[in-house]
Image (spheres, rainbow, N blue to C red):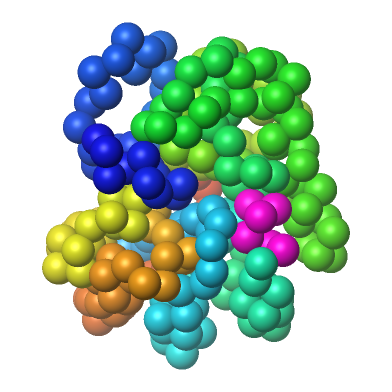
Amino acid sequence: MRPLQKNLCIVAMSLAVVSSGHAASLVEPILHIKPDAGGTGRIALTLDACGGRTDNRILSALVENRIPATIFVTGIWLKRNPAAVEIMRAHPDLFELENHGGHHIPAVDTPQKIYGIRSAGSPQAVLAEVESGAAALAGTGEPAPKWFRGATAEYSPSAIAMIRKRGFKIAGFSINGDGGSLLGARETTRRIEAAKDGDVIIAHINQPTHAAGEGVVQGLLALKQKGLTFVRLDDADGFGNNGTTD
C-alpha cells in the first residue's frame, strides 16, 4: 500500500482490500450507463483531474480524435491549469466539467485515512468539500455541476445521503482504467480496451509523467477502432448502486 500513499489521485477499485477495520463501513459505488440497444455499444469516459498538471498526451488525443469525456476537476487543479481549462471550454461538445471537490478530500464524515489520505471527518467538512468544488467551477464560468466524485472514490453511506440531498449524483465507475495512474502503459491499455457497452471508465488526466497516460490513449484508440461510441455522463442515463443516482 505504500506507493498509493504517495499519490493523491488514487482510486481504490483495482487495489487490494484494505486491512484496516474501516474498509467494511465505506462504499465504493459502481456506475453504468444505459446500453446502446441495437448499436455498436457506447461507453462513458470519466477522467479525474485531482491536482498537479495536465497530461497533454490524453487531452490532445481526445481533441484530435473527437472523443467526448467527463472531467472531474478539483479547485486545486482548476487554479493550476488555466490553459487546459480553456482548451476544454473551447470544445463544449467534447468536454463536460464536473465536481471533484475543492481540495481533493475523501467524502467520509468520520475521521480516518483512506489509502493514506485524511478524510473530511465530519458532515460539515464533507459539505464544505462538495460546495467548494462547485464554487470553483462556477468561478470559471462553467455551468453548475450535476455530478460529484470524491477523492479516493470511497464514501461513507451518510455522506452519500448528504451529497444527494444537495442535488448531486455521485459518479462511480465500472472499469478502473489506470489504477490511480499507478499502472504501467500496457496494463492500462488492456483494462481500457476491454470495456464493453454500458461501461463507465475512470482514469486520470493530471499525471503527465506517468506511463499510465500513454496506456489511456492507446486503450481509447483501440475502443474507437472497434466502433464503440463515447458519451459524456450528462448525455447518458447513468444508474449507480448504493443510492448514488436515484
Question: Is 163 situated above or below 55?
Answer: above
Question: Is 98 situated above or below 217?
Answer: above
Q: Which residue occupies the extreme bottom position in the image?
A: 64
Give the residue drawn at x 47%, y 59%: 47
Residue nearest the viewer, comparing 176 with 45: 176
**Residue 13 in the figure: left or right of residue 128:** left
- The quadrant of the image that shows the C terminus is top right
Residue 153, image x and y in percent?
45, 37
Residue 13, image x and y in percent?
30, 38
**Magenta stretch: residue 117 in it?**
no
**Residue 150 in the figure: left or right of residue 2:** right
**Magenta stretch: residue 78 in it?**
yes
- The quadrant of the image that shows the N terminus is top left
Q: In the rendered image, which quarter is residue 190 located in?
A: bottom left
Residue nearest the viewer, comparing 121 with 234: 121
Magenta-colored span:
74-79
Dominant secondary structure, magenta: helix
Give the residue drawn at x 42%, y 65%: 207
Question: Is 191 situated above or below 169?
Answer: below
Number of numbered discs visible in the structure rendering: 0
**Residue 202 in the figure: left or right of residue 160:** left
Residue 128, image x and y in percent?
75, 31
- Is any atom of residue 66 visible in this view? no
- Is any atom of residue 106 visible in this view? yes
**Residue 135 in the figure: left or right of residue 56:** right
Question: Is 82 situated above or below 192?
Answer: below
Give the residue drawn at x 48%, y 64%: 206
Residue 138, image x and y in percent?
83, 56
